[in-house]
Amino acid sequence: MEENGLATGAGTRRDGEGVRGGDKLSRQEFLRLTGVGLAGATLLGGAGCGRGGERGGEQRIVFSHGPDDTGVLEKQIARFNRQHEGGIQVEWRQMPADGTAHFNELLTELQAGGGNIDVMSGDVIWPAQFAANGWIEDLSDRFPESERRRFLQGPIEANTYDGKLYGVPWYTDAGLLYYRKDLLENSGFAGPPKTWNELKEQASKTMADSRIKNGFVFQGANYEGGVVSGLEFIWNAGGDVLDRSDPGRVVIDNPDSVAGLGAYRGLVEDGVSPEGVSIYTGDETDGIFLRGEAIFHREWPYMYGLLSDPATSEVRPGQVGIAKLPVSVEGLTSYTGLGGWNLFINSASEKVDAAWTFIEFLSAPEQQKERALEATRLPAIAELYEDEEILDKVPVIALGSEAIQSSRPRPVSPYYSDMSLEMAEQFNACLKGEVSPQEAVGTLQEQLQNIADQAS
């Protein structure tokens, strides 16, 4: 799960789109689900002991997270345990590699009263659900504004619910525009497009000049990845889904959102994107771009690492550039969908101080830098995007730094899972031409507001 490919998160799909709480659970099922605690934990750096088991004043805390094929997490936990021997020791309980299974196991235990977890990792779209149900600690006092300013804004926003901060960003993810800079140069273009109209112009000419059949491929299927794509088009036209000052008020039905989805569908209508994009997930779009069959590709940072492997890619890294996503009208701010992983304290834990000490360690610049260098995880701390060693050894961070730092969370709501299902359906129908952009946002205005109103 966690280390399958570059810049992917535990519990997230490898393309960073996240595990939507509603993939298999409706809001009602989410609230009804009950279960029993899970067993099995690994203690790194000492003998195992159950929750509450302390010897000689030593506190033992349980950290839930998925597999880590790189070995970085195991090394960091062992280092923490050595540094805190006799005081705090961490047990790492591995969660399932499959993101939905991870979510469901965690949900079952939290619904049943919290179980034996003290610190948990969590997907970027989970905090509001967990906070609204009282399952995670309010960290506002422990994580003051002076510390939050060191982190990228998007991950901080994703961890904020009802004005309070519930999680600490661990590592992040962001959508990027990959493009064939060699082919653009051959067609006379000096740089990547800034607007969707410029992308259409560049793609159309380059497709003809280079005999490439796809101008732009992206994830447009009826799933969470398609939600992220649709949101990016709406944001980059100046639209939004929820009122950011009043998250209970839906604002998607506005001209900017219509314009965004108009650009979304327009790429297909104008022949720049194939009709098949409406069923594409990351696997399909990756294959097309890596085979040299597309000029532009929207994807997460892990994609860059695939370019270096001749077994997976016919396109070399030197042929590819990375840029921010285009906007509808020049002068608008370009936003990209936020992915990533955060750290929470279980509100049922009796060892909150020890849990916080561990979170401070894992999220510190030293550990985030180590993960960037050895596991290609994008750091959530802004200053690390100026670290020369990271920029030298992790080229995707250097190339995509501007886009990564402009990431934006999906609508922060405890009912995001239900909202996401509705957005996936309407965005996909719009992309297929089954409904107009205006019909899509009109339907979503009613559906999403009903979800928000029924929950209040």
Image (cartoon, helix red, strand yellow):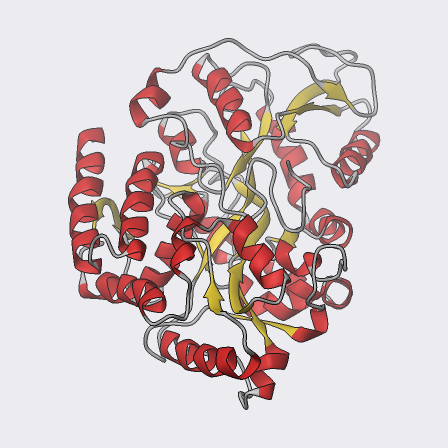
- x, y percent for residue 336: 45, 60
Horizontal relation, residue 447 to residue 77: left or right:
left
State the residue at coordinates (60%, 21%).
351
Horizontal relation, residue 25 to residue 444: left or right:
right
Let me know if residue 219 appears in the view. Answer: yes
In this view of the protein, which residue sits in the foreground, 130 or 309? 309
Outermost residue on the bottom side: it is: 188
- Relative to 101, is 272 above or below? below
Image quadrant holding the N terminus, namely top right
Horizontal relation, residue 384 to residue 392: left or right:
left
State the residue at coordinates (28%, 61%).
261
State the residue at coordinates (30%, 54%).
432
- Relative to 396, is 108 above or below? above
Res 315 → quadrant = bottom right
Horizontal relation, residue 161 to residue 97: left or right:
left
State the residue at coordinates (75%, 20%).
42
In this view of the protein, which residue sits in the foreground, 181 or 80? 181
How many numbered badges does the structure rendering display?
Answer: 0
Res 196 → quadrant = bottom left
- x, y percent for residue 321: 61, 73
In this view of the protein, which residue sits in the foreground, 209 or 98? 209
- x, y percent for residue 435: 20, 53
- x, y percent for residue 269: 31, 67
Image quadrant holding the C terminus, namely top left
Let me know if residue 147 appears in the view. Answer: no
